[in-house]
């Protein structure tokens, strides 16, 4: 696919998702970016703003296998990964695949599961494989975990450890809709069921072609150095106890390539990197005690870091 072809493909997906989801164009673009990077997304926001709706709408717009898992404290790792069970008729063990054996997996309220069940996702998210009873199963491409969690309600939840947060390419906050968008939401759902009009506008082959096209997007030395400088600055900032790792650098540059592609360009601009810094890096940082006491958010500190680093002048290759 060329950059213009991917842009047209992305616009078709935006329009289809827009049949159900009102507004949230930036959030939709972030999900499309993760889709092209085959990266996982954590949607973190209060209940009722459309996290699950957005994920369902994207999944139904793609001709891919979709599974939803409602995470609860009594959910076992085998409920997610699958297990070997004994078939008495055949007198042998057979493998029963869990919901992770899909292209897009919605892990709803992921922080309600115990750490043991949460850790069952680590291998799948990092390597797209699942090992059960010593046998490794390869997951089908593309494979994405789109997880949701409520940051406000803490009772009965198990916060995600830093090692698992680092596996998410992006963290997305939807936020409340504007007044006009809220009117549009009520009108749309009062007029009928918008889900009836939802259908797939992209098949798996088109998606894989678009994913492959990301690697051909030009990333100049100047823009690469700019992204690295931002990531390295998080490791030296006085308010940050633990900065982003090289995985953060890889995530930022790959996401910038995908972001450029869905906007019709075959080269990355410094503004693409700036746009993605909060979503890619904020959840990878651990703030120091003074920053937490001063109620400084990772996003505010990252904004200060971006302002302190000179923006390169990028020209098309």
Image: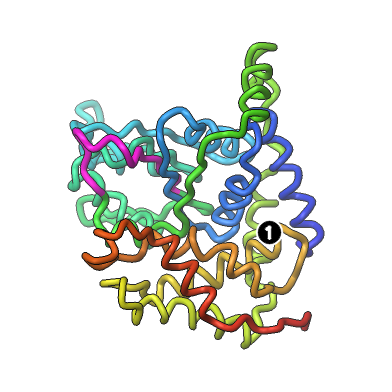
| Quarter of the image that includes the N terminus | bottom right
Q: Which of 302 and 118 is in front in this view?
A: 302
User: Within the image, what quadrant is residue 60 found in?
Assistant: top right
> Helix, strand or loop at disc 1?
helix
Q: Which residue is drawn at 51% across and 69% down?
A: 252
As displayed, is residue 83 above or below residue 294? above
The quadrant of the rendering that contains the C terminus is: bottom right
**Quick check: can you spot residue 3?**
yes
- Rendered residue at 19%/33% (across/down): 156
What residue is shown at x 53% (from left), y 53% (from top)? 142
Q: In this view, does 241 lie to the left or right of 59?
A: left
Q: Where is residue 212 in the image (x, y as percent from the top left)?
A: 64, 65
- Is residue 50 found left or right of 206 in the rendered image? left
Q: Is residue 62 above or below residue 240?
A: above
Q: Farthest front residue?
A: 294
Q: Give the range drawn in magenta.
A: 145-159
Q: Which residue is drawn at 54% across and 55% down?
A: 34
Few, some or many C-alpha atoms within 10 Å of disc 1 (few <14, some 14-19, many ≥20)?
Answer: some
Q: Is residue 185 above or below residue 153?
A: above
- Magenta includes 151? yes
Residue 127 place in picture, x, y as percent: 38, 62
**Within the image, what quadrant is residue 220 found in?**
bottom right
Q: Where is residue 100 in the image (x, y as percent from the top left)?
A: 38, 43
**Secondary structure predominantly adopted by residues drawn in magenta:** loop
Q: Mark 1 points at which residue?
A: 209
Kindly indicate the quadrant of the structure image that contains residue 266: bottom right
Q: Which of 193 and 278 is in front in this view?
A: 278
Q: Is residue 246 one of those drawn in magenta? A: no
Residue 93 appears in the figure: no
Q: Nearer the viewer, residue 273 or 148?
A: 273
């Amino acid at each position: 696919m060329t950059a213009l072809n991917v842009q047209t493909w992305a616009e078709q997906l935006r329009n289809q998702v827009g049949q159900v989801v009102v507004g949230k164009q930036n959030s939709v673009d972030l999900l499309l970016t993760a889709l092209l990077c085959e990266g996982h997304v954590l949607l973190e926001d209060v209940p009722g703003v459309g996290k699950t709706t957005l994920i369902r709408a994207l999944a139904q717009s793609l001709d891919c296998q979709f599974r939803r898992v409602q995470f609860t404290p009594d959910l076992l790792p085998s409920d997610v990964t699958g297990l070997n069970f004994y078939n008495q008729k055949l007198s042998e063990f057979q493998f029963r695949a869990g919901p992770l054996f899909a292209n897009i997996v919605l892990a709803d309220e992921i922080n309600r599961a115990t750490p043991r069940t949460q850790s069952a996702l680590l291998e799948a998210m990092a390597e797209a494989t699942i090992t059960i009873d010593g046998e490794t199963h390869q997951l089908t491409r593309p494979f994405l975990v789109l997880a949701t969690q409520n940051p406000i309600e803490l009772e009965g939840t198990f916060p995600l450890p830093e090692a698992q947060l680092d596996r998410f390419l992006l963290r997305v906050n939807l936020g409340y809709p504007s007044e006009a968008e809220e009117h549009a939401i009520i009108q749309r759902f009062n007029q009928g069921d918008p889900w009836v009009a939802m259908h797939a506008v992209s098949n798996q082959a088109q998606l894989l072609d678009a994913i492959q096209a990301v690697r051909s997007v030009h990333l100049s030395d100047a823009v690469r150095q700019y992204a690295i400088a931002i990531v390295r600055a998080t490791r030296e900032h006085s308010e940050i106890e633990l900065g982003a790792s090289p995985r953060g650098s890889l995530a930022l540059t790959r996401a910038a390539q995908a972001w450029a592609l869905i906007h019709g360009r075959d080269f990355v601009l410094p503004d693409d990197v700036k746009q993605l810094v909060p979503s890619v890096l904020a959840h990878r940082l651990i703030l120091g005690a003074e920053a937490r006491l001063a109620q400084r958010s990772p996003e505010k500190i990252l904004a200060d870091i971006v302002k302190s680093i000179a923006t390169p002048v990028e020209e098309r290759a």
